Amino acid sequence: MARSIADIQQQMLDKIAADEVLAPLLTSTSKRSIFRTFTFIVAFAISALENLMDILLASIEDTVSKAAPATPAWLQDQVLKFQYSDTDPQVIQFQQGTFAPGYPVVDATKRIITRCSVTTNLSNSVIVKAATGEPPAALTTPQLEALQSYVNEIGIAWVNYTVLSDPSDKLYVKADVYFQGTFSAVIQQNVIDAIEAFLSSIPFNGQVKVLDLERAIRAVEGVNDVLLVDVKARANSTTLASAGFLVQNNQVIGRLWNTVSGYIVGETTTGNTLADTLNFIAE
């Protein structure tokens, strides 16, 4: 903050009064004395410069406050605002002065991204994962290409952006579920529903934790206990045979799975779905 002329001049006069050589020579209290005139002129110039610097700083801070910060949270928000149409290309524009991105016509019905995560590394690379719809699914090739172009346009010039949208990861669960016999008619579907609900509740690009899976099953009404025999997770592009074990032969191999696509569902391979691999034992 700029100092007043009087404050600046007084600081100079204080320095003169403290100087062993100048103090005995410059003793006049007249405002029109030569040394007081000189200090006033210098103080005026310094104060004027400091005021100009304050004006410049305020202008810079105002511009920065309105400009796009390009943080992961900001980019995620912008991706969720992405608009797409098969017949009407959506062209992004930048506001004059602030360069904030936006569409000339905001149409929420054209916002197709329902899930998004943004991760960064130290090599100026940013990974954007996205999915569309409810339940989430992979973007089509034209949608993915349009989103990649959009991210490149609104992103920072020297940063490499990679946009990914893949089909869901898959979780294979072989388990013995001990339950109260009075729930025989509904126990299988209730447990399957609980597992699928647990998987869908995982934050996008989150982790599947073995302990949380076990808790989700045990929380089903009528379930007395569960023994996880084999639990495997895989990206959609990986075969079930090559899936990574979290539990193998009742032994925990890995406590969690970092989702590859960002989201995960029960195994879909014929003969290995949740309906096929859960063993229910009445007690």
Image: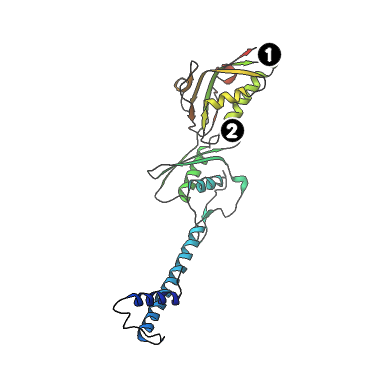
Mark before the other along the chain sequence, 2 or 1 = 1
**Residue 6 seen in render:** yes
Q: Say what amino acid the circle numbered 1 marks.
A: Gly
Q: Position of residue 147 (x, y in %)?
A: 50, 44
Residue drawn at 43 percent across, 69 percent down: 53
Question: Dot 2 corresponds to which residue?
Answer: 201
Vertical comparison of 107 with 267: above or below: below
- Position of the C terminus, as image quadrant, is top right
Q: Position of residue 197 (x, y in %)?
A: 61, 29
Residue drawn at 45 percent across, 67 percent down: 56
Residue drawn at 62 percent across, 45 percent down: 109
Q: Say what amino acid the circle numbered 2 marks.
A: Ser
Q: Nearer the viewer, residue 260 or 147?
A: 260
Q: Position of residue 146 (x, y in %)?
A: 50, 44
Q: Nearer the viewer, residue 188 or 18?
A: 18
Q: Nearer the viewer, residue 33 or 99?
A: 33
Residue drawn at 62 percent across, 25 percent down: 194
Outermost residue toward the left? 21
Vertical comparison of 148 with 49: above or below: above
Q: Along the horizontal axis of the image, is 101 left or right of 192? A: left
Q: Which mark is residue 181?
A: 1
Asked if the residue under mark 1 is in contact with the one under mark 2, i.e. CB atoms within 8 Å, the reply is: no
- Secondary structure found at label 2: helix
Q: Position of residue 149 (x, y in %)?
A: 47, 46
- Secondary structure found at label 1: helix
Vertical comparison of 184 with 160: above or below: above
